Image (cartoon, helix red, strand yellow):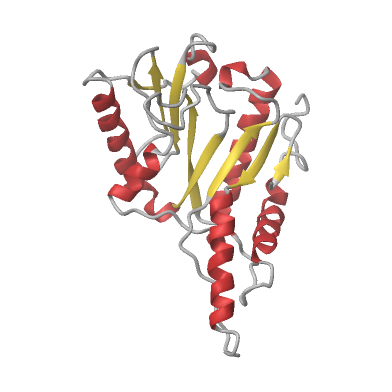
Amino acid sequence: VISVGKYIYLSVGKEAVVGTAINEKRMMAKNKNDNSDHTCTTDHATMLYLTPIDHVTSSAQLHSKAVREMDLYEKRLRMFLRSRNASGVSVERAMESDSRSPRSSKIPEHLSRKVMVFSETRLATIRKVLENGLHRESRRQFNNQQQTTLLPEGVNLNDAIMDSRNSEYFFVDFPETEDAPRHRLLTLRDKGQAVLRSNLLLDILNEFKLPLPSITNLLLHYRRNCPSEPEEELVKGLREGFQKFDPMFFNDDDDI
């Protein structure tokens, strides 16, 4: 966990921290008799998560103050990423599991807004690939009917969700680039339709062999030599880096 607010908390994906730590421990073992300076490296992608403290399954179920805090955390997170020459594509999914899956519980998961981190220099290319892939998959899943629509400016996600109990959705927020304005794409699913899988965008990236940057790219003061406890060091570094952007330290909204 990186930061905890009144209604929302920010965390880093376990796969990035643990995967990085395993790589670094292996490097330590390999170089235990090597006194030369070396840098910890990893190819594990960074995922950040904005999660409501209360159990909800859709943004439409959030209290208005929680919605404002979610937006504030996302705004500050984007500022933090820009300071690291990075950017984030936000993904939010409120869908039941696919009934064809043997692990399916038919229960919507706890809401979490995933932020996929990309370097700013590659964002424009990656964005085109992801947008095209999302539209292609939406048409395939929904029998060539265009279910994915662009949310107009001024319309928030909650307004677009008509019924929080029955409506299920897949929402992606692409940040502005030099070549394109901000795009917020919403796919609504009616009961009985196919399910857009939760890892859809990651699958698209893998298809085109487009990697995400590692967690160490977000750490300006990460030790050059591998620490003895890399998991703790990585999370500590993210907390320290985000602190000057943390809305709980510098609140833009006194009403939250």
Image spot of residue 156 (x, y percent): 52, 20
Image spot of residue 142 (x, y percent): 27, 20
- Could you tell me which residue is drawn at 63 percent across and 41 percent down? 76
User: Splitting the image into 4 quarters, where does residue 202 fall?
Assistant: top left
Foreground: 186 or 230? 230
Quick check: 40 above or below 143?
below
Whether residue 231 sits left or right of residue 159 in the image: it is right
User: Splitting the image into 4 quarters, where does residue 237 fall?
Assistant: bottom right
Image spot of residue 30 (x, y percent): 53, 81
Quick check: 58 above or below 34?
above
Where's the C terminus, which quadrant? Answer: top right
Quick check: 44 above or below 97?
below
Whether residue 70 sits left or right of residue 134 in the image: it is right
Quick check: 52 above or below 80?
above
Residue that extends furthest to the left in the rendered view of this protein = 144
Foreground: 78 or 186? 186
Image spot of residue 117 (x, y percent): 49, 49
Residue 87 visible to the viewer: yes
- Could you tell me which residue is drawn at 59 percent across and 57 percent down? 17
- Could you tell me which residue is drawn at 28 percent across and 50 percent down? 208
Foreground: 105 or 4? 105
